[in-house]
Amino acid sequence: MSTTGLLDRHELALARIEERARGENFPVVSVLAPRDARPHLRAIYSFARLVDNLGDEAAGDRNALLAELERELDGPPRTELMQRVHATIAARGLPREPFARLIEANRIDQRKARYQSWTEVKDYCTYSADPVGRLVLGVYGRAGEPDLVSLSDDVCTGLQLVNFLQDPPRDLALGRVYLPQDDLRRFGVRDDELAGPRSERLVELLRFEAARARTFLESGLPLARAFEGRARRSVALFARGGLAALGALERAGWDVFAGRPAPGRLTFARLTLMELARR
């Protein structure tokens, strides 16, 4: 079947995925960010969610769908979401590469299910996570500052590691293990144990991985100081939200099987008030 025929066949599914993408934007960012930045941030997050959903959930040939999305990135945009992405690229002068790297992350997911070392996981994060932060910097006109890019990469890598800690059962159901195999062997954990139930050695593994994520998030905390006003508050909540998620995991006793431990709306509201108070 041709790519065009495949896309026609999955048009309704793609529309549903886009609708979900539009509904899953990071809410704190849209509320605290400067008004003129909000539509661009929403477009970026919607794109990232769409790519993830295509790579994880779409029926049929996912590589073909990702390839079609990449062609749409080059234009002309066929869907309403990609029209908004193109408008954001034009309005903020964003480069193509970070968008393309997000697509490539999901191509990697189609061909790679295990990561032997932390080095391999870190390299994956340069595709799956770091590009989002670089696009956010671009929205604020700060993407050309290497020191800020480095801090942003730390925050985004930390956030990606937190996601890996929250989702071992879901990832395993998709056939993937993102925690380094070296670390699993170190703590005597088999891949199939990531489906549960909780064990002491699994808890020790998750604590070890959480310490690494915390190091990255705390390293990136100074990023917000480079901004003022609403932009500063918005950017600050990335790292602080990740640290709050680690707190939720710890309070849950690292039980990622009974549910997905995550900070609730009240926690984000408290963090928001704290950022306002810091002003």
Image (cartoon, helix red, strand yellow):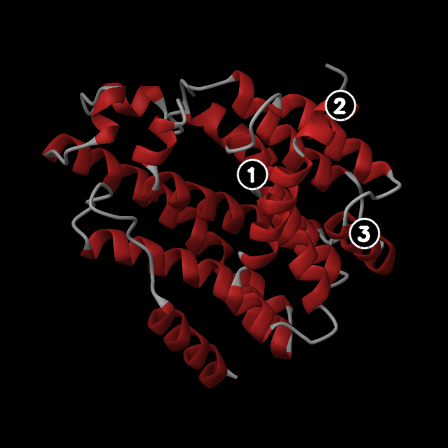
Quadrant of image for the N terminus? top right
Please report the residue visible at 39 percent of the width from the left and 46 percent of the height from the top: 162
Q: What residue type is labelled 2?
A: Gly
**Residue denoted by label 3:** 83
Label drawn at residue 122? none
**Residue denoted by label 1:** 52
Q: Which of 184 and 91 is in front in this view?
A: 91
Residue 154, image x, y percentages: 52, 47
Q: Which amino acid does label 3 sit on?
A: Gln
Nearest-to-viewer mark from 1 and 2: 2
Residue 20, image x, y percentages: 56, 51
- Residue 120 is left or right of residue 168, and the answer is right
Q: How many marks?
A: 3
How far apart marks 3 and 1 lie (CA) works out to: 19 Å
Please report the residue visible at 57 percent of the width from the left and 65 percent of the height from the top: 235
How far apart marks 2 and 3 lie (CA) works out to: 22 Å
Residue 71 visible somewhere in the drawing: yes
Dot 1 or dot 2, earlier in sequence: 2
Name the quadrant containing residue 99.
top right
Dot 3 or dot 1, earlier in sequence: 1
Helix, strand or loop for disc 1:
helix
Please report the residue visible at 76 percent of the width from the left and 52 percent of the height from the top: 80
